Image (cartoon, rainbow, N blue to C red):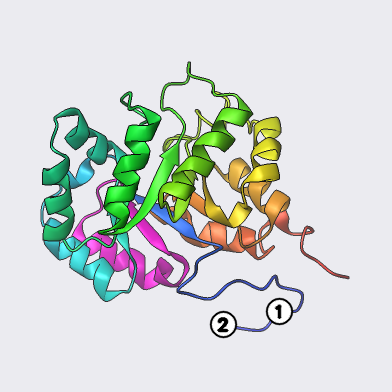
Amino acid sequence: MNYILKNIPERTQKPRVNGLTMVMDKGLSVREVEDFLEVAGPHADIIKLGWSTSYVTPNLERKLKVYKDAGIPVYFGGTLFEAFIIRNQFDDYRRILDKYGMELAEVSDGSIEIGHEEKCEYIRKLSEQVTVISEVGSKDAAKILAPYKWINLMQAEIQAGAWKVIAEAREAGNVGIFRDSGEVRQGLIDEILTQIPAETIIWEAPQKAQQVWFIKLIGSNINLGNIAPSDVIPVETLRLGLRSDTFDHFLNL
């Protein structure tokens, strides 16, 4: 840091396994990635190339190399996995992961229906090849899962080999663990945390109010996902109690 302040929460150090900031890249250019990393690279832990944007992104290999050279893992969004699965191209997907030297892969079923045992089998197979992050929850706002179902799904996917499980919210933060207004489904979160360790979950929280809520609930070293590139430094200040929203939360006067 640039100077010393007392009573600042202690952050985990990179490479982190907890306190992750997962950033949503929705189509940054190579130059934009370079500029982003110059400022926010120390605070970004994982990059998701949102949904299927990698399919249409020019200079994909150059872009991935910039992230790799910065030591920041990248993975394709879960919707791309689903696009391959719905077309019966799972083996092709595995070859794509190898072609681009991906170390992470997301397994999700937010846009298509996949039997859960089948989904867990995909997790098991891919975990032999890469580190798997699975996503629980639907992108359809009309599909509301009971808390026990969230817990059962998360437990099964962790057992199948998922390193982390993502709690679905989409890039807008208005489905899954949130109501369509963006309000946190607090009872759901409380129930999940009775059975699933917080450090195992990446909470998609693209909105500032959502980020503040989770940081106050769990602490500075909560895993947060779907963070916009321009919000990475603002999120870090929230984690450290250096923004008005969390200013008093970490003070030890």
Instruction: Name the residue type under label 1.
Output: Leu
Residue under circle 1?
A: 5
Crowd tier of the residue under label 2, counting other residues whose Cα lies within 10 Å: few below 14, some 14–19, many 20 or above? few
Residue at 55%, 57% in the rendered image: 235
SS under mark 1: loop
Whole-number angstrom distance, CA of label 1 to CA of label 2: 10 Å
Between residue 47 and residue 35, name the one nearer to us: 47
First to last magenta residue range: 26-49
Residue at 67%, 83% in the rendered image: 4
Taking the image as shown, residue 13 lies to the left or right of residue 62, namely right
Image: 141 above or below 199: above
The reply to whether residue 205 is in sight is no
The reply to whether residue 150 is in sight is yes
Crowd tier of the residue under label 1, counting other residues whose Cα lies within 10 Å: few below 14, some 14–19, many 20 or above? few
In the rendered structure, does residue 109 fall within the stretch colored magenta? no
Point out the image quarter for the N terminus.
Answer: bottom right
Instruction: Name the residue type under label 2.
Output: Asn
Residue under circle 2?
A: 2
Q: Extreme bottom residue here?
A: 3
Point out the image quarter for the C terminus.
Answer: bottom right
